[in-house]
Image (cartoon, rainbow, N blue to C red):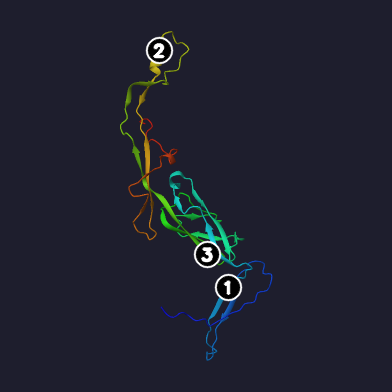
Amino acid sequence: RGPDPEAFLHVELVVENGTGGLAPARPLTWQLEYPGQDPEAQKDKLVWEIQVAERDVRALVPLVQELEILNTAPLTGVPRLVPVKLVVVEAGGVITEPPDPPGCESADKQVLQVSDGCGAVFVGGKESRGARGARVDFWWRRLHASLLFTVWAPLLPLRVQLGDTVLEQVRGWRLPGGPDSAPSEAEEPGEEGERRARGCRPQYQRTGVRVLALFVAHPLDGGRHLSYLPGPEWRLDVAHLLAGRTRVQDPRVA
């Protein structure tokens, strides 16, 4: 490591009164000349951009209530949103909202996305993986800030688990409501009991269905080591999320 650089130039700028807040960036072009320099030599020019403000704004701060997102959007089709509120902090501790729109961008749109107005980060179902430390950058004029999120995504395919894989008819137990249970106009006396017997339908065993999913976060460096929520031996039951999308392949069987 070399010695610390020494200051060789001190510039004083004079600003007229009534700048009206933060003025647009003003370019300042300058070049360095020194004794003995060839007059015909090409001189490098430097350009500074100077912004003038009546307020001494020191920091841009993004505020969120959570930095961990469980991405269930691929299963439900419903986006998961985390609202973001951006504020600026002045030298005296005054906190205000930016008077003009900020900018923002997700570092990896395959993990996490950010809305156009920077008011929320979200997962919409098109993301391909999860991650720890998924970065979202925010900027406003010369100020920058970032947030790091942990996004857990379902690892496909899901596992379907039945409580009992063999279901049989319950002997001696029948339920009313079969196709022959409705009375007819020409029904003779004494035929009601026979009709009811014919109209009963058999009762079969039932079993519960669980849909189990692993939720994982992929490493940002592209490696294969996955992080599991809450651990590699745990699967979360997401059957309640898929109730409207779960179908039996052959409804004549079950």
Mark 3 residue element: strand
Identify the secondary structure beneath mark 2: helix
The residue under the point 37% across, 21% down is 174
Q: Which residue is mark 1?
A: 49
**Circles 3 and 1: CB atoms closer than 8 Å:** no
Q: Are marks 3 and 2 in contact (CB under 8 Å)?
A: no
In this rendering, is residue 42 above or below 56?
below
Dot placed on the residue nearer the N-terminal end, 2 or 1: 1
* Residue 66 % position (x, y): 48, 52
**Residue placed furthest toward the front:** 92
Q: Give the Cα separation between the discs numbered 3 and 1.
A: 16 Å
- Please tell me whether mark 3 or mark 2 is closer to you in this view: 3
Q: Label 2: how many residues lie within 10 Å, few (<14), some (14-19) or many (20+)?
A: few
Crowding at dot 1, Cα within 10 Å, few <14 / some 14-19 / many 20+, comes out as few
Q: Quadrant of residue 209?
A: top left
Q: Nearer the viewer, residue 105 or 17?
A: 17
* Residue with the mark numbered 2: 193
First in sequence: mark 3 or mark 1? 1
Point out residue 143 in the picture as x, y percentages from the top left corner: 54, 65
Residue type at mark 3? Answer: His
**Residue that label 3 marks:** 144
Q: Position of residue 184 (x, y in %)?
A: 46, 14
Residue that appears at 43% across and 47% down = 74
Position of 177 relative to 84 (above/below): above
Question: Considering only vertical position in the picture, is 248 above or below 59?
Answer: above
- Front residue of this view, candidates 168 and 186: 168
In-image side of 85 versus 233 (left or right): right
Mark 1 belongs to which amino acid? Glu
Q: How many marks?
A: 3
